[in-house]
Amino acid sequence: MLIYHPAYDANHCLYRLLAILKATIGFSITWDQLRVLDYYYLFPSQLKNIKPWPSNIKEFRSKLKSIPDQFEDINNPARVLYDLQVFQKTAALELIAKGIISKAAFENGILKLNCDFVPEGYIELVANDSFLRSDAFEIITKALPKVEFNGESGLKKRSGLMEYIYDVK
């Protein structure tokens, strides 16, 4: 039996990365941050596993209740994020090649959306996507970018998705 999951769909990954970058336009998003935000886009109920919840975004904690539990059983979230990297990297490189993500900013470690090159058809898709108006997406794009990413109290450690002990302080 063949089962589809958007995590392993390169075109869906393009859509997700664009949606996240468009919604986080006021933040400086690094490659690793984008990967983590994309992971939570795919598995929003995993937001409930961020421990301890960051105090600087405590007003978003109540929105976690509206996120339904997932049917997938993720035993090793860090491994799932690692496996997603192939699709995420391919999608990001395609967006850079098309000029939708700034190559110069990417070379400096930041993913910056070039809104002039975003296709009109994509804008129409986004307008009709109910997930992009959900509490989960709001947490992913409005709250998580405000959280320190690296270090002992960063999102890497709180999420358990990435190694943090070698982060430069």
Image (cartoon, rainbow, N blue to C red):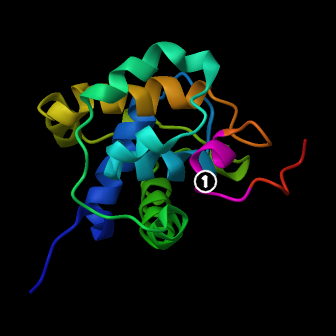
> In the figure, is residue 163 to the left or right of 20?
right
Front in this rendered view, residue 41 or 46:
46
Q: What residue is pinned by disc 1?
A: 160
x and y, in percent, of residue 57 in the image: 55, 19
> Which quadrant would residue 145 be assigned to in this image?
top right
x and y, in percent, of residue 91 in the image: 41, 61
x and y, in percent, of residue 23 in the image: 40, 28
- For the C terminus, the quadrant is top right
- Say above or below: 23 vs 17: above
Secondary structure state at the residue bearing disc 1: loop
Q: Residue at x 34, y 22 (%)?
A: 63
> In the figure, is residue 5 to the left or right of 80?
left
x and y, in percent, of residue 33 in the image: 59, 45
Task: State whether residue 134 appears in this view.
Answer: yes
Q: Residue at x 23, y 25 (%)?
A: 133
Front in this rendered view, residue 8 or 67:
67
- Specify the amino acid type for callout 1: Gly
Q: Residue at x 70, y 48 (%)?
A: 109
> In the figure, is residue 22 to the left or right of 106?
left
Front in this rendered view, residue 99 or 27:
27
- Say above or below: 136 vs 3: above
Q: Residue furthest bottom?
A: 1
> Which quadrant would residue 150 be assigned to in this image?
top right
Q: Which residues are magenta?
A: 155-163
Specify few, some or many for label 1: CA neighbours under 10 Å numbering under 14, 14-19, or 20 or more.
some
Query: Total of numbered circles in the picture?
Result: 1
